[in-house]
Image (cartoon, rainbow, N blue to C red):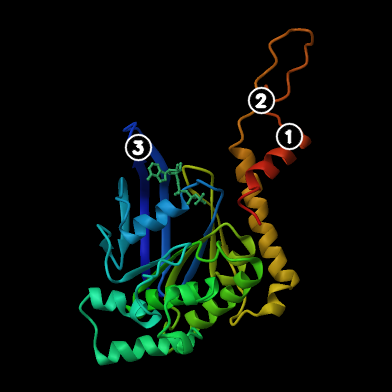
């Protein structure tokens, strides 16, 4: 399959507005994402997931290396990429249909055909009956589905999703994960668009992904690539299977290893009442310290 997105020796960072200091967020990233592939990135908080996604969206400039979409260096935002954020960002003064049509309108591509496509999208997303309602009249889950429909309406080649379900409660989240898979696979509206999805939720990653990338703590590197070789559609039964749990365990274990690798060792003891080396003096970490470090670092990464 042809590559959609490639990164080579990619470094990304931020210049602090006040300090002017530079923070490296992504370091020497090598990555190939094939067309129609669903890739999920997981990693600890602050490791650089959003920075990478925003660079792909053209919102964060490349510091060095290459980041190419269909062989062309990404230099800014473009209509072939749609971004879905954590919070549904619908315009409150526009109806659901008008929100879904907004991107097309901005791109000067509003035609009878694109309007019909937007209506199809709303039907597939289960929102046909609320097309003329306003965002405040929808539930949080419906708003996020409308957001997804809006992202798909412009027919992008790459869909970028940054923790789109993290603001939802657990039950709605599971429903939306299933909905996303159903919409993503639907030939008439998405036909498995290439997708790059960021999450903290290991189960979400396993359910959605063709491939999971586990990022190391900051600056991000790919610590593990895990192909999820499970047929689609993936349903609630598979979500409870031993295979599903085993994939999740592999990811959690890698996150734990990365957390330990990036945990500073305790300082050596300075008093000389013992010849024995202090814990951590040679980089040893006790089992208790190992568990504590893993628990602290993984608190926000593995749910
Ligand atoms: N606009 C910014 N200016 C300066 N530094 C930033 C900016 N945005 C992010 N950073 C820094 O870049 C690093 C990566 O942040 P990023 O938001 O990409 O991480 P993340 O993995 O998405 O985190 P989270 O999972 O908590 O959303 C962090 O050290 C963060 O403080």
Q: Secondary structure at mark 1?
A: helix
The answer to the question of whether label 1 and label 3 lie on touching residues, with beta carbons closer than 8 A, is no
Residue at which label 3 appears: 16
Q: CA distance from mark 1 to mark 3?
A: 33 Å
* Residue that mark 2 sits on: 266
The residue that appears at 30% across and 68% down in the rendered structure is 70
Q: Position of residue 275 (x, y in %)?
A: 77, 11
Question: Horizontal placement of 255 versus 289: left or right?
Answer: left
Asked which quadrant contains residue 91, the reply is: bottom left
Q: Tell me: residue 271, above or below residue 303.
A: above
Q: Which mark is residue 289?
A: 1
Residue appearing at x 36%, y 61% in the figure: 6
Q: What secondary structure is found at the residue carrying circle 3?
A: loop
Q: Kindly tell me whether residue 218 is visible in this rendering.
A: yes
Do tag 2 and tag 1 residues touch (Cβ < 8 Å)?
yes
Mark before the other along the chain sequence, 3 or 2? 3
Q: Are marks 3 and 2 in contact (CB under 8 Å)?
A: no
């Amino acid at each position: 399959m042809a590559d959609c997105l490639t990164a080579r020796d990619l470094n990304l960072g931020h210049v602090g507005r006040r300090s002017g200091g530079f923070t490296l967020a992504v370091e020497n990233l090598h990555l190939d994402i094939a067309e129609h592939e669903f890739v999920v990135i997981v990693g600890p908080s602050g490791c650089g997931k959003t920075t990478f996604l925003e660079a792909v969206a053209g919102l964060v400039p490349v510091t060095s290396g290459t980041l190419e979409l269909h062989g062309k260096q990404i230099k800014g935002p473009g209509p072939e990429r749609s971004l879905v954020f954590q919070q549904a960002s619908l315009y409150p003064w526009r109806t659901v249909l008008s929100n879904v049509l907004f991107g097309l309108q901005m791109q000067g591509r509003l035609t009878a055909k694109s309007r019909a496509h937007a209506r199809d999208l709303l039907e597939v997303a289960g929102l046909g009956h609320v097309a003329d309602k306003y965002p405040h009249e929808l539930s949080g889950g419906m708003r996020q589905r409308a957001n997804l429909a809006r992202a798909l309406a412009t027919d992008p080649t790459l869909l970028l999703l940054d923790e789109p379900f993290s603001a939802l409660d657990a039950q709605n989240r599971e429903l939306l994960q299933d909905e996303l898979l159903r919409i993503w696979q639907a030939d008439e509206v998405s036909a498995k668009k290439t997708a790059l999805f960021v999450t903290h939720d290991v189960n979400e990653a396993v359910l959605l992904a063709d491939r999971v990338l586990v990022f190391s703590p900051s600056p991000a590197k790919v610590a593990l690539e895990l192909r999820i070789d499970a047929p689609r559609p993936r349903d609630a039964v598979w979500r409870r299977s031993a295979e599903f749990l085993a994939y999740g365990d592999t990811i959690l274990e890698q996150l734990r290893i990365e957390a330990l690798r990036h945990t500073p060792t305790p300082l050596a003891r300075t008093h000389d009442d013992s010849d024995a080396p202090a814990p951590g003096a040679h980089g040893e970490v006790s089992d208790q310290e190992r568990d504590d470090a893993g628990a602290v670092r993984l608190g926000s990464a593995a749910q």
